[in-house]
Image: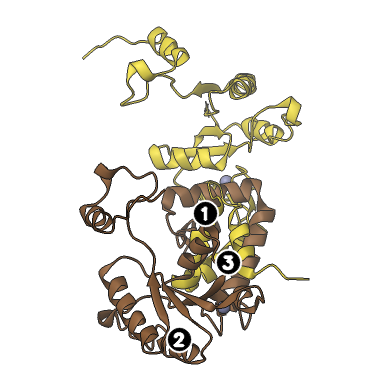
Chain colours: A brown, B yellow
Amino acid sequence: MTQVPLLDQLIDALRCLPGVGQKTAQRMALQVLERNREGGRRLARVLGEAVERIGHCGRCRTLTEDPECAICRSGQRDDALLCVVETPSDLAAIETATGYRGRYFVMHGRLSPLDGLGPRELGLDELARRLDAGEVREMIIATNPTVEGEATAHYLAQLARGRGIRPSRLAHGVPLGGELEYIDRGTLAHAFGMRSEITD
Amino acid sequence: MTQVPLLDQLIDALRCLPGVGQKTAQRMALQVLERNREGGRRLARVLGEAVERIGHCGRCRTLTEDPECAICRSGQRDDALLCVVETPSDLAAIETATGYRGRYFVMHGRLSPLDGLGPRELGLDELARRLDAGEVREMIIATNPTVEGEATAHYLAQLARGRGIRPSRLAHGVPLGGELEYIDRGTLAHAFGMRSEITD
Ligand SMILES: [Zn+2]
Ligand SMILES: [Zn+2]
């Protein structure tokens, strides 16, 4: 009986990271062992702590090791705006790219009955209670423009309207810097139909 | 005083891996936490163990957690052939690409006096003792074709010759599939000078 060498175990374990195949994993393992053991030691410690301790914010459901995340705890955010996203990555993208200063709600998915993802699994009962509390005036629905994302957006919009809250969604259209001939037809048709008058 | 969120610590720690910038690190952290905690837990454990336990093989100096590595322990390798490489990555590349069945010696670098890397730091005294033992008949010098690599190859060749051991080096030339017009001039000149007769 032979034990699998630790180096091979490490190369294999690194492949849990997205975009890391055999060759990249080998390069990573050797580089850490040859040149950056201190970094590797720190990564092992922080990763181990993160997978055990990081859970979901009790208020917005994003990833945090605290009972409530930093955004929910902040006194500098507008409680009248609530942005609903599918994933913590979407939240991070909006935080990085925009000046949005409202609150968030993270569904960790979208309605997908075939995958067993219904309103309860997405925490939409929690979301409904939050809307019932009366502070939210606009709900920004930032689901992805997929079939399931659109269906989820429709469901969320009804949830909001039923409580007198204005639902809104991100604008679709030609990406900045995008060339018309390379835009998919659906997006181009939508952008054309939603054209606005040039007023300046 | 605010504690840095664990998620941000994890993103930062992942950047110790080669080729991983801020954006990739964020994607890795979120994906592991959202979709593969078991993989993350295993990576943390194996990486922690690897940085503590993996050292250098007592015989060939490659990376291993054992006193001697699997290649050195193997009874299926030819003791008359010894391949000297700069790094464990070079060893891995030769193992993957070739059918070589001899032994190895890993220098963990090349001669570089300005960086304080002399024969002692590269373990060349150990290598000399191994050559003195009398089993090695050919020493394959697989240093990189850099100025320092060539100087190191020259030093190694003398070490071998002084003991009646035949030194050899990898062939240089046009890479398979390489197009002549894109090959650097030095390589092309070398390949031209080393041309061989077509005998079939
Ligand atoms: Zn939160
Ligand atoms: Zn060895």
Percent position of residue A112, x then y? 29, 79
Disc nearest the viewer among 2 and 1: 2
Q: Residues within 10 Å of mark 1 (few under 14, many from 20)?
A: few
Counting residues from the start of the chain, the first of labels 1 and 3 encountered is 1
Tell me what residue is drawn at x 42 percent, y 83 percent: A165
The answer to which of A13 and B128 lies nearer the viewer is: A13
Q: What residue type is labelled 3?
A: Ala
User: Residue tagged by mark 2?
Assistant: A127
Would residue B5 appear left or right of A155 to someone viewing this image?
right
User: Dot 1: what SS?
Assistant: helix
Q: How crowded is mark 2: few (under 14 residues within 10 Å), some or many (20 or more)?
A: many
Percent position of residue A179, x then y? 31, 42
Chain to which the residue tagged by mark 1 belongs:
B
Percent position of residue A9, x then y? 50, 60
Disc nearest the viewer among 1 and 3: 1
Say if A112 sits above or below B54 in the image. below
Say if B21 sits above or below B137 in the image. below
Q: Which amino acid does label 2 sit on?
A: Leu
User: Residue tagged by mark 3?
Assistant: B44
Tell me what residue is drawn at x 58 percent, y 20 percent: B150
Q: In which quarter of the image is residue B139?
A: top right
User: Residue tagged by mark 1?
Assistant: B23
Q: How many labels does the image show?
A: 3
Chain to which the residue tagged by mark 2 belongs:
A
| Cα distance in 3D space between marks 2 and 1 | 30 Å
Dot 2 and dot 3 within a common chain: no
Chain to which the residue tagged by mark 3 belongs:
B
Would residue A163 appear left or right of B142 to someone viewing this image?
left
Instruction: Give the residue furthest to the front.
Output: A199
Q: Residue A191 carries which label?
A: none
Percent position of residue A113, x then y? 27, 82
User: Dot 3: what SS?
Assistant: helix
